[in-house]
Image: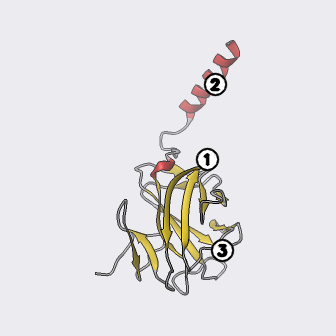
Amino acid sequence: MKKCFSILLLICLMAALVPAQAATTNLAAIRINEFMASNGKTIDDKNGESTDWIELYNTSDEDVNIQGLCLSDGKKNLEKYVFGDTVIPAHDYLLIFATGTEEVVDGEIHVSFKLSASGEKVVISYQGVILDSISFDEQEKDVSMARVDERNWKYTSLPTPGAENAFED
């Protein structure tokens, strides 16, 4: 009992030392915001390749550390990519390239799967629980699918990787 109390006290002291502006782990604030499954010339990764991409958005007023969050292209294997210590600032975006090779290139995240231009899913989950997902049909080259609001998505020929979504009038 005394050992448990000591450990609990140590944890509380350590938590008190963490700066107030440290990232939270409010993973429910993270949303899939936009993606492109047929990138022709919209954006190149740091390797100079035009690959599929997925954009996550932090809806929170606080920075969120997404360590342990999983990204996948379907429900069969929710853990195709597991994020390490990665912070998405409050109301900001994280662009991920679906290149088929898992690596970090100059701070740019590449995941070990690609998106199918003929249609599939993008899923984010944590410990087997799906937090957000979108199913899509066939994609046109350089047309993204972007979130309009909490429930609605729309195709757009004005893709905005890493920025607020834009739509044609």
Q: Position of residue 69 (x, y in %)?
A: 59, 52
Residue located beneath label 2 in the image: 10
Which is more foreground, mark 2 or mark 1? 1
Q: Nearer the viewer, residue 97 or 135?
A: 135
Residue located 60% across and 49% down the image: 128
Dot 2: within a 10 Å radius of its alpha carbon, few (fewer than 14), some, or many (20 or more) residues? few
Question: Residue at coordinates 61% horizontally, 62% vertically from top-left?
Answer: 72
The residue singled out by tag 3 in the image is 99
User: Label 3 amino acid?
Assistant: Thr
Q: How many C-alpha atoms fall within 10 Å of the one at disc 3: few (<14), some, or many (≥20)? A: many
Residue 17, image x, y percentages: 56, 33
Q: Is residue 158 above or below residue 133?
A: below
Reading the image, the residue beneath label 1 is: 127
Q: Secondary structure at mark 2?
A: helix
**Label 1 to label 3: alpha-carbon separation:** 24 Å
Precedes in sequence: disc 2 or disc 3: 2
**Separation of residues labelled 2 and 1 (CA atoms):** 27 Å
Q: Secondary structure at mark 1?
A: loop
User: Is the Cβ of the residue at disc 1 closer than 8 Å to that at disc 3?
Assistant: no
Q: Residue at left 49%, top 72%?
A: 136
Which comes sooner in the sequence, label 2 or label 1? 2
Q: Image quadrant for the N terminus?
A: top right
Q: Secondary structure under badge 3?
A: loop
- Residue 13, horizontal then vertical, whole percent: 58, 26
Residue drawn at the location 63% of the way across and 24% of the way down: 10
Q: Residue furthest left?
A: 169
Q: Nearer the viewer, residue 165 or 12?
A: 165
Q: Can you tell which quarter of the image residue 111 is in?
A: bottom right
